[in-house]
Amino acid sequence: MSDCIFCKIIAGDIPSDTLWEDENVIVFRDIDPKAPTHVLIVPKEHIVTFADFKEGQGDILLSMSKAARAVAEAEGVLDSGYRLIVNNGPDGGQEVLHLHMHLFGGRPIGPMIKRAE
Ligand code: 5GP
Ligand code: ZN
């Protein structure tokens, strides 16, 4: 998608700190890290939310899982633990409308979400 920032990163038009990739997925560091390790696991295809996978795209999900393991291991957080988050839509806090899984690690990540007021 021409106006999508992550598609531009995948195309190499915008630089990124890429840590891992295969034919389905790319992993790069978040530009505004919230933890010592904060990377984004991104399908190369322009899929908008986690609910938009279609039949035949199971290999992309498997690549996302492989990417999470490989990067967690490379970053030294596989045993200490890490958190995976996918924000979906406005209430989910999704700012970039190209599916991505955040991986946070390198310190205790804290409580899961704030309790509703
Ligand atoms: P969301 O809120 O959509 O789940 O997260 C979007 C994430 O993308 C944010 O954590 C933000 O810092 C990151 N981000 C936005 N633009 C760029 C960029 O151009 N490069 C990189 N590496 N990360 C970006
Ligand atoms: Zn895109």
Image: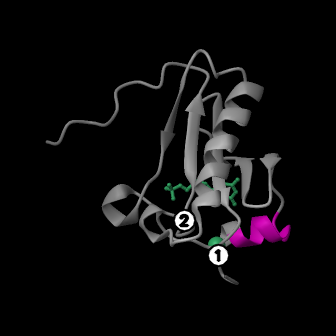
Residue at screen point 67% across, 82% down: 1
> Quick check: 16 above or below 53?
above
28 or 23, which lies in front? 23
- Helix, strand or loop under label 1: loop
Tally the numbered discs: 2
Circle 2 residue: 96
In magenta segment, residue 10: yes
Q: Position of residue 3 (x, y in %)?
A: 66, 81
From this viewpoint, which residue is outermost toward the left? 117
In terms of secondary structure, what is the magenta stretch mainly? helix
User: Which SS class for mark 2?
Assistant: loop
On whether ligand 2 comes within 8 Å of the CB at mark 1, the answer is yes
- Which quarter shows the C terminus? top left
Please tell me which of labels 2 and 1 falls first in the chain.
Answer: 1
Q: Is mark 2 within 8 Å of ligand 1?
A: yes
Q: Is residue 56 above or below residue 64?
A: below
Q: Which residue is mark 1?
A: 4
In percent of the image, x 55 and y 50: which residue is there? 101
Q: Report x, y in % for residue 28.
A: 74, 48
Residue at x 74%, y 54% (from the top left corner)? 26
For the residues labelled 2 and 1, say whether their Cβ atoms are less than 8 Å apart: yes
Q: Which residues are magenta?
A: 7-14
At label 1, the amino acid type is Cys
* Residue 79, quarter of picture: top right
Q: Which amino acid, by three-letter code, is at mark 2?
A: Val
Q: Position of residue 6 (x, y in %)?
A: 68, 66
Colour mode of the rendering: one colour
